[in-house]
Image (spheres, rainbow, N blue to C red):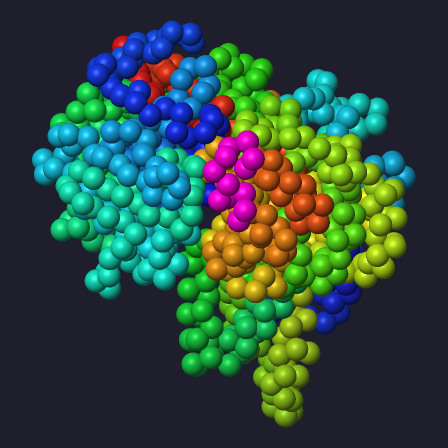
Amino acid sequence: MTTTSRTGRRAALAGVAVATTLALTACNANAPEPAGGETTAVQQGGELHVLTSSTAINWDPATSQNLAITTLGLVERRLTSWRTDPDGTTEVVPDLATDTGTPSDDGATWTYTLKDGLTFEDGTPVTSADVKYSVERSFAPELSGGLGYHKGLLEGGDDYTGPYDGGELDSIETPDDRTIVFHLDSAYGDWPWIVSMPAFGAVPEDQDDVETYATDPVATGPYRVAETVEGTSVTLERNPEWDPETDDARAAGPDSIVFELGQDETVVAQRLIADSGTDASAFGASFVPPAQLAQVQQGPAKDRLVTSGPGALAYLAINTEAEGLDDVDVRKAISLAVDKNAYRVAAGGEISGDFATTLVTPGIPGREEYSDGVNDAAPEGDVERAEQLLEDAGWSGRELRLVVQDDAPNLARAQAIQQGLERAGLTVKIVPQAADVWTQTVTQGDGSGYDLTLSSWQPDFPSANGNIQPLFHSSQVGGGGYNLARYADPEADELIEQATQETDAEQAAKLWVEADKLILGDAPVVPLIYTKNSFLHGSKVENFRIPDFPAYPNYLQVSLSR
Amino acid sequence: MSIDRSAEVVGPAAPAVTRGVTGSPGGRAPLWRRLARDRFALAGGVVVVAYALVALAAPLVTHALGVDPYTYDLDALGPTGAPAGPAGGISAEHWFGVEPLTGRDLLAVVVMGSRTSLLVGLGATVVSMVVGTVLGLVAGYFGGWVDWVVARLIDVLVGLPALVFMIAIGAVAPGWFPRLLLLVLVIGLFGWSSIARVVRGQTMALRSAGFVRASRALGASPAHVLFRQVLPNLAATIVVFTTISIPGAIGAEAALSFLGVGVPPPTPSWGRSIGDAVTWFSVDPVYLLFPGLALFGITLAFNAFGDGLRDALDPRSAAPRRRKGGAR
């Protein structure tokens, strides 16, 4: 879900889920690349280094928000996974399961069969009970914070509190060791994408320890955790029990992978530019900061810079419950006063994104551009109209608190917003907060601590649902949800629910566009840019590609040249 | 600045009891003339005055030049957010170039940044001087357990990694607390140990001096003795210490802003500009130049001036033996 991200997150592209059922394996798994893009056969061997600013890797599938193609995917398989092709497409492919799911006629029951011969790293077979247990534990209150789309979709999910109280979730059936059946509240067409999320892996109940699973997981993927030096590094080695024949999504090139933790982003960029020693076999998991981005674009490292297409929506959220901001005209004035151009420059200029006008991001099926007179104002804003609106609304002129995370990129962006709004006579005070405090302020409690905040959102699966529901449904206000505008509108809620349940893809897309227009008409957020993420890699790193969706590199395909 | 006051205080009041603290009145050239003979100190003094004038008149200066440290000029930037054109975007419009990612005028940022630096530098120094002097006086005069407590406090403070504590306090301070005041207090309260130690030592020496014993015998209260009899004799020391403490405090503010716990943006601050500029160095080295020079200039000037002032006030430390300045 969330915000500007670290080791990886969401995703979206490709078409509707069910597209790729039986593209089953049979071929050997070190998949020769399909014709088309530049094809480099996946070279085996070597030690890959991943340089990240994160200080820890959370391997617990219940609390992780990883995308299917980043860190967790190396160690933990799920029912389905994503395969990205060099031409940029991403499709959902079977992983632990033999297909991406068989829906019942009403679309509300999905059945999966596990592949033959799958085992954990210790050689014990993976059974459907392990998958069921993994999903169940994601409901436990002590394991909150992971991707939770399934929690609202599975029957009885709202009241279930996890397996540690002894209860089972009856809407997940395991008629035999290899079959697992999910009963949903209603039809849900994107379910194959939902089961690619971390919780739909396999966790052996007898090896589960809530305290330690996050550092000591039981591997099903091509790698297992060999060594963890707290705050410094995590080393992965090959998992001998993994059978490439059963895996379509992973190339598993390197013999070992070392995550170097707690790295400064600027230093990482400089190291990768210098490309010496082990850094030639490394890539940066964090975005390249603006200064280094400018440096790289002028230097020889340019061909080792990989930039995604427009991915996440970066937006300014307006707290619709705050004093005076409950007036839609004031919010529209803010939307018009914002200087998107200054924001984009602060984020690193043209390479960092395209100007945004809608809530649904490019690349999502059914997305439509539209104009409501406010959303598509010039990138520099329309200060005169903003002033007029503020005057007519009788704006009090009080100081607005723009609460942002306390790091250089966010502060630079916040200042760009501040100077934009001040052109229209609004007074803005930037309140920097440490990342944890910021999360607390904007996602918990009554929201009295902020008027404005900056965030960005990459959908977790390629559907407008992933753009809109988490950010604008009233159930996502407070309590850890990311409805940062605290927007609660019964009409919008109803439309969101209706669109979620719509099984006809085209009809659903229409409803989402309608929701997009309805919500943005109330101006709870100001769409700023569709961000493009830039990553650097060393000269020996191959197959480092970013698909159209998500805007993150596919770790599962990366390999090293000799 | 403080020249007049020190000359006045030092002049008549003090019998030359202590080790060279006082300028004895008889037969020597007036303070300012002695100071004027030290070219280095004089230049330092002139530079300090110039900085002070610029800081006081900063809004007028920027207004007169038609620049503003808060206004974005995106046209001055290239497509990557780096300043367009060579040398950090130096042009007729922007004499010092512009800030990357914002296009804000760097001259305006540097000029307005002088206010932050001087305000925090002077404020923190005043805090540490007041605290250090009072504690030093009290400890040196009363001795006994008071002295023991103050001496241990000083020891602790000297051994403390002050910067680490300043960062920690800066990071946890509540958002509503005025940031400038916080910086003044934090830097000031971590910086009084050296002055306290010196004042304590000199007060101990003065305690047994004839004029002090005389006033005590006449029934003067301890407060009277401390502040009317002893303190004036320490004036020169305090003045010199103040002058050479200021650059340390300015540097501390810059360090904290550099590390991101100083004044919040967009308030201009040399330290933060330098911090930002470091990451841009390979693309836009000029960005580092002007805030860096400004900080370097004021620190050097205060040190030169403070050094000269000490030499002028203390004939024995004059000439070749020149101790390194910088109390911190």
Is A324 on the left-hand or right-hand side of A292?
Answer: right
Question: Quick one: quadrant of the N terminus of chain B?
Answer: bottom right
Give the overall secondary structure of the magenta segment.
Answer: helix
Is B126 on the left-hand or right-hand side of A84?
Answer: right
> What residue is drawn where x is 62% and y is 79%?
B226
> What residue is drawn where x is 66% and y is 46%?
A519
- Residues in magenta, as a range: A497-508
Q: Position of residue A479 (x, y in %)?
A: 48, 60
Residue B231 in sight here: yes
Q: Position of residue A324 (x, y in %)?
A: 75, 61
Query: Is B254 within the magenta?
Result: no
The single residue placed furthest to the right in the displayed view is B64
Compared to residue B218, the image places residue B157 above or below, namely above
Query: Is A504 within the magenta?
Result: yes
> What residue is drawn where x is 28% and y is 39%?
A111
Q: Position of residue A204 (x, y in %)?
A: 17, 46
> What residue is drawn where x is 32% and y is 31%?
A100
Instruction: Tell which of A335 and A515 is nearer to you.
Output: A515
- The image quarter in which residue A119 lies: top left
Q: Position of residue A372 (x, y in %)?
A: 76, 38
Is A3 on the left-hand or right-hand side of B125?
Answer: left
